[in-house]
Image (cartoon, helix red, strand yellow):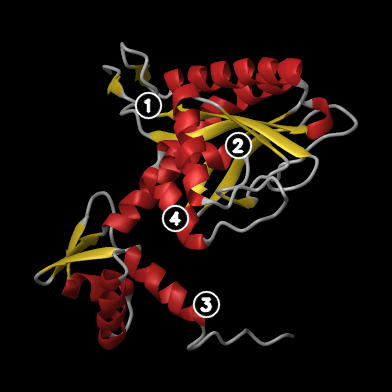
Amino acid sequence: MTPPQDFSGSPVQVLAKAAAVMDCFTIDTPVLHIGEVKRRSGLPPTTTARLLQSLVAENLLEREGENYRAGLRVLAWSASAAAGSDLISLGAPLLDELRDETGETASLQVRNGAQRITIATAESLRSIVCRTRVGGLMVMHAGASGRIFMAFDPAAFEAAVRAGLTRFTPSTVTDRSLLKKQLDDIRRAGVAVARDEREQGLSSVSSPIFGREGRLVGTMSVSVPSFRLDEHSEQRMVEATRRTAAVLSGRLGHVPSVDGTIGETRARPR
């Protein structure tokens, strides 16, 4: 029989102990005294105190005297998870429709720091396709979806710049001034088209998805082999992607502004 692994002192064990502390906080008990955290976690008092200090430093908990509550970082994760859940449940049928209309792979993506991550996809049924893997991470500055995040979320642009505007192909834009000009054009158009920026032969079309308050929550994209993206097919995919993204935004509670400004909205009454 294989003996149980000893994770004592390992990163896995530290993470498990930190999770035990975080698990003490629930919707019914959002604020806890330090003594109650020690009791609920079942950890040694010194270990609990040390973990609480580290979790506060990482904005995972907030401290008010001897009491603790979930920190802003946890709230951001919660909002992201909720948005992702809604995007998948409401967006999956629309991905199938967009895939069938364009004949190309359609996907939903959300931002993850300086990267973007695919959360749902409907793969093209054609023999030559561009595959997008659920859970796959991609850079922000190369590709239509990343351009949308940078155009409508200043934090995404700054994160991408800090991470470095790496050149992947001759078409990758690495000049910050030129990139900012292109993002201005994307904001006005409400759609981005990228050709061979992340990989030769791979092109994409993407539009923003907004939530109730007009906040960017994700992107709707079509990935297409570059040889199939001629002038006619590009216009068709632009219109289909922009329209489908707008439908999903509406289902998430987004109401466009009366003057047509993209991303500036009022919340839909419940």
Q: Earlier in the sequence, mark 3 or mark 4?
A: 3
Q: Amino acid at mark 1?
A: Gly
**Residue 263 image label:** 1
Residue 19 in picture, x, y percent from top left: 40, 68
* 89 or 123: nearer the viewer: 123
SS category of the residue bearing label 3: helix
What SS does tag 2 mark? helix
Kind of residue sitting beneath label 4:
Ala
Image label count: 4
Sequence-first disc among 4 and 2: 2
Does residue 85 appear anywhere in the picture? no
Q: Which residue is mark 3?
A: 12
Mark nearest the camera among 1 and 3 is 1
> Mark 1 to mark 3: distance in Å?
41 Å
Q: Which of pointers 1 and 4 lies earlier in the amino acid sequence?
A: 4
In the image, which is nearer the foreground, mark 3 or mark 4? Answer: 4
For the residue marked with disc 2, what is the amino acid? Answer: Ala
User: In this figure, which residue is indicated by the disc labeled 2?
Assistant: 144
Which residue is disc 4 drawn over?
Answer: 159
In percent of width and height, residue 257 lies at 32, 16
Residue located at (67% from left, 87% from top) = 3
Q: Are dots 3 and 2 in contact, CB under 8 Å?
A: no
